[in-house]
Image: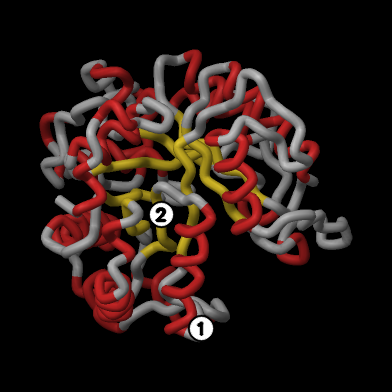
Amino acid sequence: MTEANSKPEENLKSGSALERTYVSGQFVCTGEVGPPMESSFHHVEMYGNGMKGRVDSINLTDNQTAMTRLSSWAAAIKLVQMGLEPNWQMVCRDRNRLAMQSDMLGAYAHGVRNLLCLSGDHQAFGNHPGCKGVYDLDSIQLISMVKRLRDDGVFECGAECKHNPKFFIGCAANPFADPFEFRVTRLEKKIEAGADFVQTQCILDWDRWAQFMDLVVKRGLHKRVYISPGLMPVKSPKMARYMQHGVPGMIVSDEFCEFLEKAANGKIGALDLTVDYINRCRAMEGVSGVHIMAVAWEEVVPLVVTKAGLLPRPFAAFKDNPAPISDEIKALWKKATVDNYVPELA
């Protein structure tokens, strides 16, 4: 338990299940769903039900990889309607401050209580490379604006908001970008702006992550914010090696790749490595939880959470029991040859 977990319950900022879990000192577990590139909630509902009662909150990405997708706020509202708790992502790339604050009011009125503030992948890498990025605010300014609206009840322009949204405010950190030492400084700036919790980019190099956390602890930042590292099951050794050598800026260790290469079943190896990283994180000073970001493989989150012994969740989905696994998800497990990874779920 970190010192940040010692805050009494009466000081809750939003009252969300995610905040309650952090504050209680329980080890947090969050999942993630990438909204589809179509006007349908099918995948949001399918993956959301699979995670129901198994995670404390579910991230809804905001036009991830700068691709046009079902809006994150719409997906977040759908989860609320399903009795789940969303962690709504908002990027600076697509909205000015007027639209941002308008969307905050609407999402909060529908029951959304967690907001993750991000810069967003640059539009040049997406499917509309010629579009104009907004970036009216950067992510640090966005955090500050959300905090001011929550704590002071005023919009960015200074006008009063009589029924102000009270979000639990999140930010991202990338321990794997250069210059390395600046990553901790940038995280501190986000904390000073008002971030309550942080989710990091996925750990694909454990030693680099450990170095980052060592600097975080030396600065005492773990006492001021809740930290959940991102963990991503990588489907195949070939994909891991491609990420290591073919993706600029991506740091993937040989240890990570070799673990998958030595596994008899690469997909089972990916799940085993994710579970191993969860256990390592639980033993690490300053870490308050984990964020499982199974990109384009969301169906395996229930397997990982169960195998890692993270159940039951203390406040997940308002203490609902885990939902039954659908036949559709089981079929995806079978197709990926991971259907017997957790026999009791098969």
Relative to 91, 235 lies left or right = left
39 or 73, which is in the foreground? 73
Where is 123 relative to 211, above or below?
Answer: above
Crowd tier of the residue under label 1, counting other residues whose Cα lies within 10 Å: few below 14, some 14–19, many 20 or above = few
Where is 230 relative to 76, above or below?
Answer: below
Say if residue 228 shows up in the picture: no
- Helix, strand or loop at label 1? It is loop
The x and y percentages for residue 221 are 33, 64
Question: Where is mark 1, residue-wise?
Answer: 178
Say if residue 181 shows up in the picture: yes
- In what quadrant of the picture does the C terminus appear? top left
Q: Quadrant of residue 324?
A: top left
Which residue is drawn at the image coordinates 25% and 42% (left, top)?
28
Amino acid type at circle 1 is: Asp
Amino acid type at circle 2 is: Gln
Relative to 319, 17 lies left or right = right
Where is 167 relative to 293, above or below?
Answer: above
- Helix, strand or loop at label 2? It is strand
Question: Where is mark 2, residue-wise?
Answer: 199
Counting residues from the start of the chain, the first of labels 1 and 2 encountered is 1
Which residue is drawn at the image coordinates 19% and 28% (left, top)?
314
Which residue is drawn at the image coordinates 17% and 64% (left, top)?
285
